[in-house]
Image: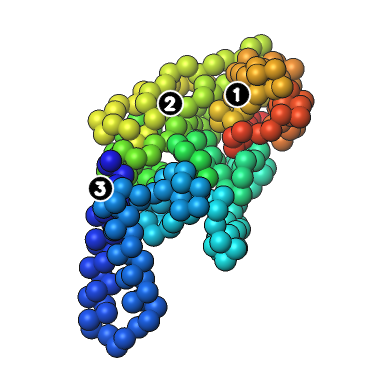
Amino acid sequence: MAETTYAREQLLERRQKLTSVLTHTRANPHLAALLDQVDAALERVEMGSFGICEYCHDSIESDRLACDPLIRFCIDHLSREERSALEQDLVLAATMQSGMLPPREQRFGDWEIAHHYQPMGPVSGDYCDVITCPAGELFLLVGDASGKGVAASLLMTQLHAMFRSLIHCDISLKELMERANRILCEGNSGRSFATLVVARVSPAGLLEVANAGHCTPLIAGKSATTRIETASLPLGMFTGVEYEVERHQLDAGDTLVLYTDGVTETHNGEDDDYGCQRVEEVLRRCFNHNPRSLVDACVADLAAFRGHSTAMDDVTLMAVRRC
Ligand SMILES: [Zn+2]
């Protein structure tokens, strides 16, 4: 019901813009046709058939409808032209998204960093970034936007831009999380949210971690693997959430590992989840590997566990080691 009200408002706003352009310009057949489409969509809202595929009568995907309230067919029943346009858009979106990723491996001061980023479809809702600061600090961010497909990838893009601006504001990690949460809450009226871990490391090895409802970060060390258990609510759910920051000292050889639930919730043929413990087992075996080799070992173990089962989610893994 709320979605239909939102669609009606969107359509009425577009209608008003179109009519005002049409009254101030010469006859434009393209705009006139668009106005007809808007009126037809408003009629569907009134008749209760808005958001229903005209071919199969199933619901049209809500993320597509939110982007374009004029669409009349579900993704399985697009015309050839619509399908081709959508495919071109997805290729462009995927190219833009891969351009936002950090290098697969990099070194910054005493830190070596590597990641693995595997979208399930053309675009991913996973968020993965490494941000370096002039003072020698390093921010590592891994998150997961709610939903799937294009809508999730748009939120991922928003996270990318927001954190790249906020991190340079010279505020504490706690304030960074709380500000990011407020921005997301104000911007999306509770429609979407993101789980996320932000880790900050100093040149002297001090690690600070804030976790907004995301998978437990792990530290792989010589003698043990440590779970960083503190967690709060995802970003974008409630405005006034406070975020705790946990601190650890990383020594030479210690590796921080961040990942998304595409790792832990991977299924095998028998309906078992991969789980956090299997990640920890790989870390115990490979704690002395460099980040690239550690991430690759995790990915290989995950692939062996999954076997021939289909991947159901985006997968992201990041490892950061103090040399
Ligand atoms: Zn359909």
User: Where is residue 313 drawn, in percent x and y?
Assistant: 59, 35
Q: Label 2 is placed on what type of residue?
A: Gly
- On-image quarter of the N terminus: top left
Q: Label 1 is placed on what type of residue?
A: Thr
Question: At 25% across and 47% down in the image, what residue appears?
Answer: 5
Q: Secondary structure at mark 2?
A: loop
Q: CA distance from mark 3 to mark 1?
A: 38 Å
Q: CA distance from mark 1 to mark 2?
A: 14 Å
Q: CA distance from mark 3 to mark 2?
A: 31 Å
238 or 76: which is nearer to us? 76
> Mark 1 Cα within 10 Å, few/some/many (few <14, many 20+)?
some
Q: Report which residue position mark 3 lands on.
A: 5
> Mark 2 Cα within 10 Å, few/some/many (few <14, many 20+)?
some
Give the mark, 3 or 1, whose residue is nearer the N terminus.
Answer: 3
Question: At 29% across and 28% down in the image, what residue appears?
Answer: 241
Q: Report which residue position mark 1 lands on.
A: 264
248 or 284: which is nearer to us? 284
Q: Secondary structure at mark 1?
A: helix
User: Where is residue 223 drawn, in percent x and y?
Assistant: 66, 11
Q: Is residue 13 above or below residue 115?
A: below
Q: Secondary structure at mark 3?
A: helix
User: Where is residue 16 drawn, in percent x and y?
Assistant: 22, 68
Q: Report which residue position mark 2 lands on.
A: 213
Residue 168 visible from this viewpoint: no
Q: Label 3 is placed on what type of residue?
A: Thr
Specify whether 226 is left or right of 8: right
